[in-house]
Amino acid sequence: MTHALDTDDLFIHQIQQHCAAARLNFFLIEPLWVQPFFEAFQQGRVWARVLLNMHSEHHLPEEIYHRLVWLAAQRQTYVIDPPDRALAAFDKARMHSRLMAAGLHVPHTVFAHSDALETFKLSDSDRAALGTPFVIKPALGYGRRGLVLDATSERDLARSVQAWGPGTYLLQRRITPRLIDGWPGYFRVYYVFGSIWCCWWNCYNDNYRQVTPQDMQRLGLQALEDIARRIAGLTGMNFFSTEIAWTDSGQFVVIDYVNDQCHMLSQSADPQRGVPDAVVIGIAQRLVEAARDYLTRR
């Protein structure tokens, strides 16, 4: 099993441990040796049966991990997830209409392209629907780069473009989650080959805690799992996370549609921003199980 680096030691060691138990070879493709690995793979001197993509740039075709993932897919390596499928799901502009057509709640959105930066104008109806302030984000953005949370006019689009670069942008109504016991009703839900982990995610300070079975029952949060499964069905994705806000009106609104390379930074490594260790450990185990099952079928 091959794995690219964008995580911490707990996740990596869990993957390695479960690979060993399943009698699978494991190799971590770190930045230090990704170029020679790519060349050896290209020349047929090394092979990978499964590649877990944790670090490729969808918007940068020349980036080495991007090229490695596409090369692996062309060589019939089982990529989690295949790059064409992952790109289609990760592109927020493309996913928005698909989610709406499936009946899922998403923020009111206006699309703009960086090429039209000088001429782009919001209509009066769009201004009213977006409210003030509103959010601007790049369609292929991640990690908050290019994210503007306090936009008040189309002029703020320039701030996002300056931070991210050319491409399509989403101008969205800002969704405020309800407060539950002093914690925002905002969730990150992980879908991994049919298994689901739900986490409270404090969108104001990045702190995580796992949704417990008691939370699920007491608050009626089963919709979180349903939404994740519907997104998986729409996209064909096997490993992703999605962000969902629960509003005062009772709606579950999908905010960040599909994150296809989930950051598995553990809480033990970073108590403030890390994912609960139990979630990291469970996801690592499920990924290796899926790889083993695939190879057994082959």
Image (cartoon, rainbow, N blue to C red):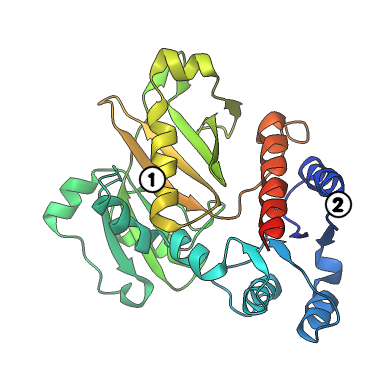
Q: Nearer the viewer, residue 175 or 261?
A: 261
User: What's the amino acid at mark 1?
Assistant: Arg
- Residue 50 in percent (x, y) is at 71, 63
Q: Residue at (80%, 74%) from the top-left corner?
A: 47
Q: Nearer the viewer, residue 231 or 185?
A: 231
Q: Nearer the viewer, residue 222 or 123?
A: 222
Please determine whether, in this image, residue 122 is positioned above or below residue 65.
above
Residue at numbered disc 1: 230
Residue 69: assigned label: none
The N terminus, quarter of image: bottom right
Query: Horizontally, is 103 left or right of 212 in the view?
Result: left
Query: Horizontally, is 147 left or right of 266 in the view?
Result: left
Residue 119 sits in which quadrant? bottom left
Is residue 148 at least partly visible in the picture? no
Residue at numbered disc 2: 23
The C terminus, quarter of image: bottom right
Residue count near mark 1 (Cα–Cα under 10 Å), binned few <14, some 14–19, many ≥20 = some
Is residue 67 at least partly visible in the picture? yes
